[in-house]
Amino acid sequence: MNQLAVVARAGFVDITPSGPVTLGASGLPDTPVSAVSDPLEANILVLGDSGDLVVIVTFDLLYVGHDLRRMLEDRLAHVVPPTHLFLAASHTHRAPMVDSTKPSLGRFASAALETIADQVYEEVRQRLSGDGLLATVDVSYGSHSAGVNRRLRRRASVGRRGLRFNPVLMAPNPRGLNDSTVRRMRFMSEDKNVVAELWSTALHPTAFPFQDRMSADFPGYVRSAIRSDAGAGVPVLFFQGFSGDVRPLTPVNGLGLRRFLQGRRFAGFSPDEYDEWVGQLVCDVLNASWEAVTGEGVASVRLPVDRASFVMGGPPPDKGWLHALRLGDMTILGVPGEVVTEYSSSLIPVSPITDIWGVSCVDHVWGYMPTHEMLNEGGYEAHGFCQLFEVDSVNPRVESALRTSLTTLISRIADS
């Protein structure tokens, strides 16, 4: 079968705020932050010819949010329909909070939101004003050892709520499910230059060692390394995988009373420990062996879903979409939520699709999407997040709803 070739245009913009902003889920929800450790970016890839375009934008943000989605749909309405606009967040916890519906995670940064929308629109407009390049597409697979499942059941634990039996704590669980796959995709021009690269893995970017600095976290470090290899101006788009219950493998708390009462718990990286950790992750990502993506054409399909299928209560929007892109025989499937790793088992390719990348944190995120077993066990992903996300509870039928939607969308994108 022939290697996939598609007309591509790509670019990126620095979306680092020029002044103080509150960050999303940094642990400092009301504290303006101005220090910058490394730049935040929006990376853009436009595929196809005029009249049949797909625009993909990935952001160094906690979430995209309804407001940013709506602004870009409005600004780009004359060139790309909403069904062909794929927006995803890296889920870094060190970026301005542009989602207005979760104030407990960070005060809304309205000025940053407006600026980001304007910047991305202008970059897309400039990309479309020039000719695209015919690019062939390659894919690579690898693995890393940077993450660990973060749900651990203990027989007993003593904490703020007193003595609890059989609680599920946020603690390292090496036996828990953990998708350590590294996926990469590159678009190569006829003169063998990299036009753009996509990459993905399932790993919460929550371990950057400074709460009060903006940072793209590990996606930014990997991006810089890819550019050192492929070219300084290469757009690099990162997709957060199904990582709702997976986080960086940080050190654990030392011996003492807390460890005696609660067991091994996550502790933060020191700056040197973080540098060593992210350096190894970079090496694992760059260790690529490329093969051709086969098939023809690019397609985009969205499946409407209701918020009430996943969480009960909460602020608008009430409607959203699962969004799938087909690139030849490959599919990227985005979900508007923090999806736990167990749902990767539903990403079963249907001919002619040969592989599916599961992507969390597209568009507006309503909350976590746990399994039925997790709901029975409890823990942060089952109910602990709800107050922070302004929702009442998780729908007890979330697993059947999500698995059915994933299966339906995979069939539709395979037929597209």
Image (spheres, grey):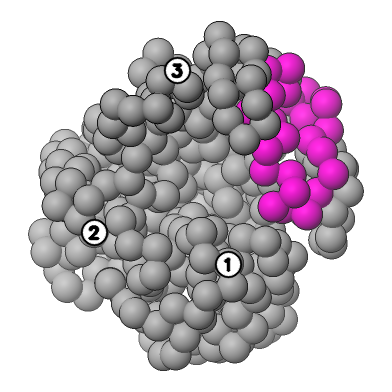
Amino acid under disc 3: Gly
- Quadrant in the picture for the C terminus: top right
> Magenta region: which residues?
375-400
Q: How many marks?
A: 3
Q: Check if residue 392 falls in the magenta segment.
A: yes
Q: Which residue is mark 1?
A: 29
Q: Which residue is mark 2?
A: 221
The x, y position of residue 328, in whole percent, is 45, 43
The x, y position of residue 101, in whole percent, is 74, 65
Q: Which residue is mark 3?
A: 176
Q: Which circle, 1 or 3, is nearer the viewer?
A: 1
Which mark is first along the chain, 1 or 2? 1
Q: Is residue 391 above or below residue 151?
A: below
Amino acid under disc 2: Tyr
Instruction: Tell me what residue is drawn at x 64 percent, y 83 percent.
Output: 110
Q: CA distance from mark 2 to mark 1?
A: 25 Å
